[in-house]
Amino acid sequence: MKHYTLFGNPVSHSKSPCMHNLAFLGLGEEALYTRTLLEDGTKLREVFFEQGLMGANVTVPHKEDALRACDEVDSFAMAVGAVNTIVRKGDKLHGYNTDALGFLKALQKFEKDIQTILILGAGGSAKAISVILREAGYDVTILNRSHARLESFKESGFATYTFEDFEATPYDLIVNSTSAGLEDNALPTPKTMLVELLSNAKASIDIIYGKATPFLQLSQNYNLPTKDGSDMLLYQGVLAFEKFTQGRYTFEEIEKYMKRAFI
Ligand code: NDP
């Protein structure tokens, strides 16, 4: 029986074990996917080999440590500085980032008529999403409440703003990639700014999943097509599973079983 796990802190809330076990079961793979609460991210490689794992996913706050734990990291994961999927090949660990492609797939299935995108937040997920969206040809701008994390975006050539120097010109899509609304009732920007943005937008996405955040609730007041982060989560999982099973199954075959975790 092959063993896979999710490393993170916390991990108890995660849907990933359910998603992957449904796909393993449905596709007849002899494999088990567990969750591993990891406090010290620098121990990831050691724990990986101790548990005899064949692969793993990695969530907050260990995605940068996961990159350092790998022997080989694919170019996209290297560009965003974060690994969320590890596959063991012999005695080497190979690292990938499927979060961003998961987001892109979710967006492309959701809205076709999008060119300009404003990303709220400048954390790890904003980094991954912004790089893949730019590669896919979208015009991407970043707005964050504070300066520090914007520096690396600026160095990569993105237009970046804080609330102080931002002027709310129209954007087709507004993406909330902050954690505002995850465990509180906060909006990701001052309300007047968000109202102006949403009233001129074509659609909005919150990457937080499984709850109607204040951001999504406000978007609905403007009759915008809205989407939470469930599809991003599902698709990053499907893409990770493709890596775990070395491409033996198509995206659709995996999705068919994995999406049952969201019923
Ligand atoms: P990080 O901790 O790396 O970054 C958090 C960002 O949110 C920072 O830019 C921070 O700003 C900003 N922020 C936090 N609180 C507030 C607030 N009250 N108001 C305005 N801005 C705020 O987080 P991640 O990028 O890793 O994750 C962000 C969210 O994305 C989480 O809610 C997570 O659940 C979700 N997520 C969903 C995924 C999915 O598959 N659907 C995958 C990955 C993440 P500052 O720099 O000023 O501190």
Image (cartoon, grey):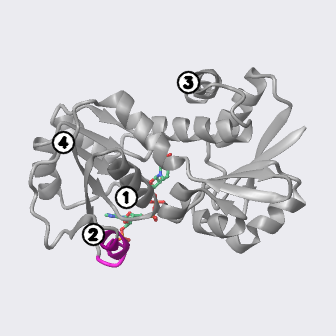
| Callout 4 amino acid | Asp
Label 3 or label 1, whichever comes before in sequence order: 1
Q: Nearer the viewer, mark 2 or mark 4?
A: 4
Image quadrant, ligand 1: bottom left
The earlier-in-sequence mark between 2 and 3 is 2
Evaluate if marks 2 and 3 touch, with contact meaning CB atoms under 8 Å apart: no
Distance between the alpha carbons at the discs numbered 2 and 3: 35 Å
Measured as percent of width and height from the top left, residue 225 is found at 25, 31
Specify whether tag 2 is near ligand 1 (CB below 8 Å).
yes
Q: Would residue 91 be found to the left or right of residue 78 on screen?
A: right
Decide whether the magenta segment is chiefly helix, strand or loop: helix
Regarding mark 4 in the picture, which secondary structure is present there? loop
Q: Where is 216 relative to 37, above or below?
A: above
Q: Is residue 116 magenta?
A: no
Q: Are marks 3 and 4 in contact (CB under 8 Å)?
A: no
Residue type highlighted by circle 3: Ile
Front residue of 88/209: it is 88
Residue 181 appears anywhere in the view: no
- The residue that label 3 is drawn on is 263
Between residue 159 and residue 2, name the one nearer to us: 159
Q: Which residue is mark 1?
A: 178
